[in-house]
Amino acid sequence: EDNLRPGALRAMVEDPQGNLWLGFDNGGVRFLNYQRQEYRQFIVATDNRNSISSNYVFSLALDQGVLWIGSETGGLDRYDINSASFRHYWHSSGQKDGFKSGVYSLHNDPSGYLWAGTMSMGLARINKKTDEIRYFTTEDGLPNNTIYKVLMDNQGLLWLATNNGLARFDPAS
């Protein structure tokens, strides 16, 4: 059995040490270090709160020793690589502003925010220092609340792939 083929590969990122982090549809997250031939798997463990919240991973982002994980059924997870601990941002996990929707896309911006494109809650801005979450939706001018991809251009504008086409979003306004 090939453990690197658990399902569709939806996301991957490389950390500064050259390790690969892979996000699978119904396979959780896999960590690979080819030089040391090290392999780790992160999947849901219902008896362990310090596990990934969903095996259906859509997006990954790395930022200073933190792996952000966007999933279909678990919202957003924060994995601290150094302490090997998870923090869940799902509404039912006690997080006041937690996600009630899956996360398709993640993007770090240089001003300290993580942007998340969601299945049905629009665009989420997460303050990585305070954990405050702010949602932007059709009520704020987005063409649709389903955001498949979030990219930032060199002028600091966000470009969003939505169910109603391409949208430009200015985080400064």
Image: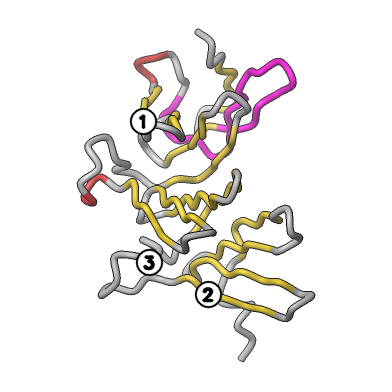
Name the amino acid type tagged 1. Ile
Q: How much space separates mark 2 and mark 3, taking CA atoms?
A: 11 Å
Q: Are marks 2 and 1 in contact (CB under 8 Å)?
A: no
- The circle on residue 133 is 1
Q: Earlier in the sequence, mark 2 or mark 3?
A: 2
Mark 1 element type:
strand
Name the amino acid type tagged 2. Gln
Q: Position of residue 154 (x, y in %)?
A: 74, 21
Using a 10 Å C-alpha cutoff, classify the residue at mark 3 as few (fewer than 14 neighbours), some (14 to 19) or many (20 or more): some
How many dots with numbers? Answer: 3
The one nearer the camera, 100 or 76, is 76
Which residue is the extreme one toward the right?
Answer: 35
| For residue 144, above or below residue 95 | above
Which residue is the extreme one toward the top?
Answer: 173
| For residue 131, above or below residue 137 | below
Quickly name the residue at label 2. Answer: 41
Q: Which residues are magenta?
A: 144-161
Is residue 145 part of the magenta span, yes or no? Answer: yes
Quadrant of the snapshot with the N terminus: bottom right
